[in-house]
Image (cartoon, helix red, strand yellow):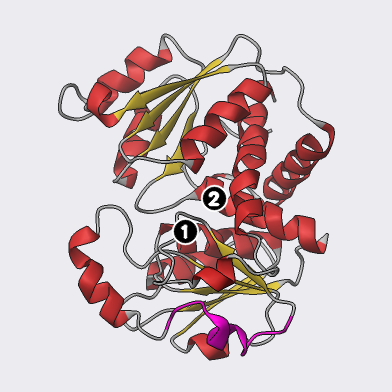
């Protein structure tokens, strides 16, 4: 059973992380039961989404509950009314809140004022539900995550940060390759190194060196939502970091291809890599639903 909130992958211990993966695998294999019948999840979205909204709504549906979507236009959180008022109003009507926000401090403020659990559905600091789905995908393929080595090529962003923390706790070895100026923050590396767990995180600049001897190669968009003004500069800075056939030639022949989607095909990843037999990107997308079922069931049903 998890604690009250899931605002960061750091809200779970290594044993709880393993337990969530076990639960998600069991639910995917055996189906779910209606453990959340009569319960509702409010989903506050400041950013649009295909996978996050659908996976949360379907997770609640499969568990017997209801997912209530609240768009940025409807709520105008922080403008029409303060975050703390939104948190306290929703706490009177639903059993949990999932928030997909621009700023991580918004998620933390919701958690501070809400009387119900708050789940981080994405923020600028972390994407814990994505990391959980990614580990679930690798666990399905390899059976045991202990000692698995994989590479992340690209921006040291929210996804990379959550993967770094999760990898250490799961006993995995993550190698990150980023252009200078886009690396994981030193604070993130220090925090990951201090976590309980047998894994490790290594930061490099050479993507070809990063993918040697790995079981999977992961990438993400070069410019996330909210960074559109930086897109042209980022495309220039990330030249040479595309996940393509040339890069994968430096990796083992059986290394998997991963992307959290949506992908800018032809930019950070080529179309042929997404469509290749190595690709597990759509397994990752589906596993968002199973991972979130495990989180919600653990928080709300124990």
Quadrant of the frame with the C terminus: top right
Q: Is residue 299 above or below residue 269?
A: above
Decide if residue 196 is in sight here. no
- Closer to the camera in the image, 297 or 110: 297
Residue 272 placed where, x, y %? 56, 72
Task: Report whether 185 appears left or right of 298.
Answer: left
- The reply to whether the C-beta atoms of the residues labelled 2 and 1 are less than 8 Å apart is yes
Q: Quadrant of residue 164?
A: bottom right
* Residue beneath the point at 60% across and 65% down: 275
Q: Is residue 249 above or below residue 109?
A: below
Q: Is residue 99 above or below residue 105?
A: above
Q: Which residue is mark 2?
A: 130
Q: Main secondary structure of the magenta part?
A: loop
Q: Is residue 40 above or below residue 105?
A: above
Please tell me which of labels 2 and 1 falls first in the chain. 2
Q: Which residue is mark 1?
A: 159
Decide if residue 65 is in sight here. yes
Q: Quadrant of residue 291?
A: top right
Residue 108 placed where, x, y %? 36, 38
Query: SS class of the residue under badge 2?
Result: helix
* 198 part of magenta stretch: no
Q: Which residues are magenta?
A: 241-253
Q: Quadrant of residue 76?
A: top left
Residue 293 placed where, x, y %? 65, 33
Task: Report whether 242 appears left or right of 248.
Answer: left
Query: SS class of the residue under badge 1?
Result: helix
* Residue beneath the point at 32% across and 28% down: 71
């Amino acid at each position: 059973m998890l604690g009250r909130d899931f605002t960061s992958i750091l809200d779970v211990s290594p044993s709880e992380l393993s337990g969530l993966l076990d639960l998600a695998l069991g639910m995917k294999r055996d189906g779910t039961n209606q453990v959340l019948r009569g319960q509702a999840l409010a989903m506050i979205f400041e950013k649009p989404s295909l996978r996050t909204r659908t996976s949360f709504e379907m997770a609640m549906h499969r568990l017997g509950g209801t997912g209530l979507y609240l768009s940025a236009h409807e709520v105008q959180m922080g403008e029409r009314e303060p975050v703390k008022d939104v948190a306290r109003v929703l706490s009177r009507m639903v059993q949990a809140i999932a928030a997909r926000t621009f700023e991580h401090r918004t998620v933390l403020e919701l958690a501070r004022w809400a009387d119900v659990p708050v789940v981080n559905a994405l923020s600028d600091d972390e994407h814990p539900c994505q990391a959980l789905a990614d580990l679930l995908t690798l666990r399905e393929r390899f059976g045991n995550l202990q000692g698995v080595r994989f590479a992340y090529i690209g921006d040291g962003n929210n996804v990379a940060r959550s993967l770094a923390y999760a990898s250490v706790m799961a006993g995995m070895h993550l190698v990150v390759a980023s252009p200078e100026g886009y690396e994981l923050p030193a604070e993130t590396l220090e925090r990951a190194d201090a976590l309980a767990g047998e894994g490790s995180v290594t930061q490099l600049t050479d993507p070809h060196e990063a993918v040697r001897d790995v079981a999977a190669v992961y990438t993400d968009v070069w410019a996330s939502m909210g960074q559109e003004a930086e897109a042209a500069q980022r495309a220039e800075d990330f030249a040479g970091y595309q996940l393509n056939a040339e890069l994968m030639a430096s990796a083992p022949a059986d290394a998997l291809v991963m992307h959290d989607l949506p992908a800018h095909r032809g930019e950070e990843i080529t179309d042929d890599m997404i469509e290749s037999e190595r690709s597990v990107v759509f397994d990752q997308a589906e596993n968002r639903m199973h991972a979130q079922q495990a989180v919600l069931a653990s928080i709300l049903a124990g």
